[in-house]
Amino acid sequence: MGLGLELRGLTKDGHEVEIEISLSPVEFDAQLTLAAVRDVSERKRLEEQARQAEKAQEEVRRRDEVLAVASHELRGPVGVVQLQLGVLQRTAGDTIHELTGMMERMRKVESNARHLARLVDDLLDMRQLQGGTLPLQAEEADLAELTRDAVERVREPVERTGATLTLLAPVAVRGRWDPIRIEQVVTNLVANAAKFGQGKPIVVEVESEGDRARITVTDQGIGIATRDLERIFERFERVAPSSGGLGLGLYIARQIVLAHGGRILVRSAVGSGATFTVELPRETRSA
């Protein structure tokens, strides 16, 4: 039986190359072994090129997939906005019935416009992250207040799912963070909880411990399988293929938290809901 080794060697002119050494015992003499030395640098280079090409193809496939999903996701809200605006233009009346109908249509327009804005923001953030930059504008802020503002901003659409949304933030938690980005994290986590929460209660809690601050978002929904707990933070990944969205919310939330020098953890099991915990240092420098 032969033995193969892959090593690095030097040519006569001092260039480093990759070599493959094959050792084979001679059948008629147990004391002899044949050694064959081959320069495999070119083969290794071609293999690496093939790997890079395959990786590039996978990136293109995933990009095309997200663009297809984005087109589908954007088409729905745009159609609703156009339809409702057309109806509003045709139904300018002053009866209670007509005014009630107009208010409901305006609510649908506002909801879909908010959805469109969120999709566009996610795509823009993804583009920034692909460029390796996620600028932060850190300033003195109260994490409890930032979280409260974010929760109130999404309370109405969340509670329309039948869920109750409770905030536990009894004391101020002071520190330096990017307020817009932190509110974006909270919004994404609460929206995710509402999407998979099956209309059950959602609890958001803000607390601090020493030089660290913590935001926890807990739902009682469908939960996440253990094998998917890490995957859900990747680009374009969704807990359920039919869940809608671009699969960017948790990815962007994690990147924002990492940019602050923090971390985001998830604890969950199928059928037992999920708890997302954001841990942040109290001091964040602008980038």
Image (cartoon, grey):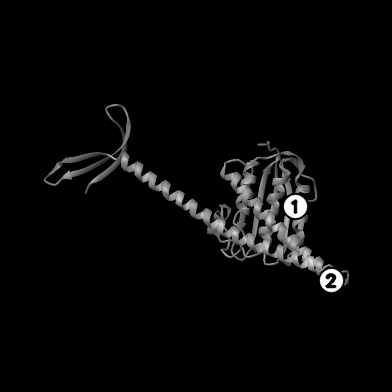
Measuring from the top left, give residue 2's x and y in whole percent. Answer: 22, 46
Measuring from the top left, give residue 182's x and y in whole percent. Answer: 70, 47
Q: What residue would you read off at disc 1?
A: 150
Residue at image location 54% in from the left, 55% down from the top: 231
Measuring from the top left, give residue 272's x and y in whole percent. Answer: 63, 64
Q: What residue would you read off at disc 2?
A: 98
Q: Is residue 264 visible?
A: no
Tell me the kind of residue under disc 1: Ala
The numbered dot on residue 233 is none
Tell me the kind of residue under disc 2: Glu
**Label 1: few (<14), some (14–19) or many (≥20) C-alpha neighbours in 10 Å:** many
Lateral position of residue 108 relative to residue 250, left or right: right
- The residue closer to the viewer here, 142 or 270, is 142
Above or below residue 199? Residue 215 is: above
- The residue closer to the viewer here, 273 or 42, is 42
Q: Considering the image in quadrants, where does the C terminus appear?
A: top right
Residue at the extreme front: 90
Q: Quadrant of residue 210?
A: top right
Q: Quadrant of residue 276?
A: bottom right
